[in-house]
Image (cartoon, coloured by chain):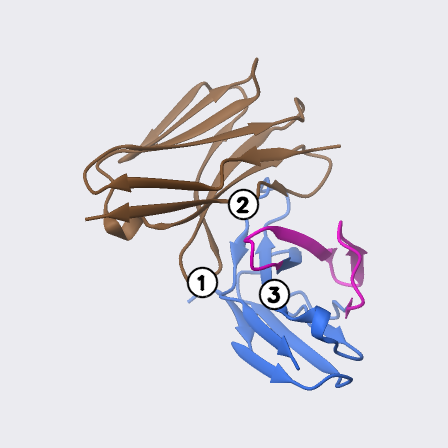
Chain colours: A blue, B brown
Amino acid sequence: EADIYQTPRYLVIGTGKKITLECSQTMGHDKMYWYQQDPGMELHLIHYSYGVNSTEKGDLSSESTVSRIRTEHFPLTLESARPSHTSQYLCASSERGGGEKLFFGSGTQLSVL
Amino acid sequence: GEDVEQSLFLSVREGDSSVINCTYTDSSSTYLYWYKQEPGAGLQLLTYIFSNMDMKQDQRLTVLLNKKDKHLSLRIADTQTGDSAIYFCAESPGYSTLTFGKGTMLLVSP
């Protein structure tokens, strides 16, 4: 079944640890995105990619990095987690030329102690 | 820059109609979207409207677009408790990524 998957679903980690949030989609979409959602509901675009080997920073400055080596995979890495990184992280994908009809994963809730 | 504004909260009784309003600033937006987020989940595309349309109806959902006033609304007829969620309005300028509003939390009481 075509879908978009995020793992882990929940992550509690100590300050200073390196973490990678996984995102994979089976729809063959060219475009992929990472959003950070704060407790007040607002969504902030932190990274996006329009295809393999293409990555761009979003509107919100982020200390995270991303890579796009394969079409279906768009992992997000935090080299040194801090309490200010505590948030919900949502991955999404869309077709090229499909407007911006985004398909979202279920999210990763990250808590940094 | 682009900006999308929504009211933060709406409370209705089951069976009533709900109207969620949104204003946007970018007149070059090609599509305008409504996304729904249920508790503990990601966003789900609910419906969208092309900028040259005034209205779109899909079962209990009606989207109205007033391009002159840059105003978009989502009407949910016969609102059910399962409609309780956060609703996001978003615009797509065509040259950039989506701009989301801050979301409207809809609470439907029995």
Q: Are marks 3 and 1 in contact (CB under 8 Å)?
A: no
Q: Nearer the viewer, residue A42 or B54?
A: A42
Q: Residues within 10 Å of mark 2 (few under 14, many from 20)?
A: many
- Pointer 1 chain: B
Q: Is residue B45 left or right of residue B68?
A: left
Amino acid type, callout 2: Lys
The residue carrying mark 2 is A101
Q: What is the secondary structure assignment of the residue under circle 2?
A: loop
Amino acid type, callout 3: Tyr
Q: Is residue A15 above or below residue A34?
A: below
Does the magenta run of residues contain A48? yes
Q: What is the secondary structure assignment of the residue under circle 3?
A: strand
Q: Is residue B9 left or right of residue B30?
A: left
Q: Is residue B49 above or below residue A92?
A: above
Q: Where does residue B26 sit, x and y in percent of width and height?
A: 67, 26
The residue carrying mark 3 is A89
Where are the magenta residues, as a range?
A37-65
Q: Is residue B57 above or below residue A90?
A: above
Label at residue A12: none
Label at residue B41: 1
Q: Nearer the viewer, residue A92 or A80?
A: A80
- Pointer 2 chain: A
Same chain check for tags 3 and 1: no
Residue drawn at (72%, 57%) of the image: A46
Q: Where does residue A87 sit, x and y in percent of width and height?
A: 62, 67
Residue drawn at (20%, 43%) of the image: B14
Residue drawn at (64%, 42%) of the image: B98
Q: Are marks 3 and 2 in contact (CB under 8 Å)?
A: no
Q: Is residue B71 left or right of residue A110?
A: left
Q: Is residue A8 visible?
A: no
Does the magenta run of residues contain A63? yes
Amino acid type, callout 1: Ala
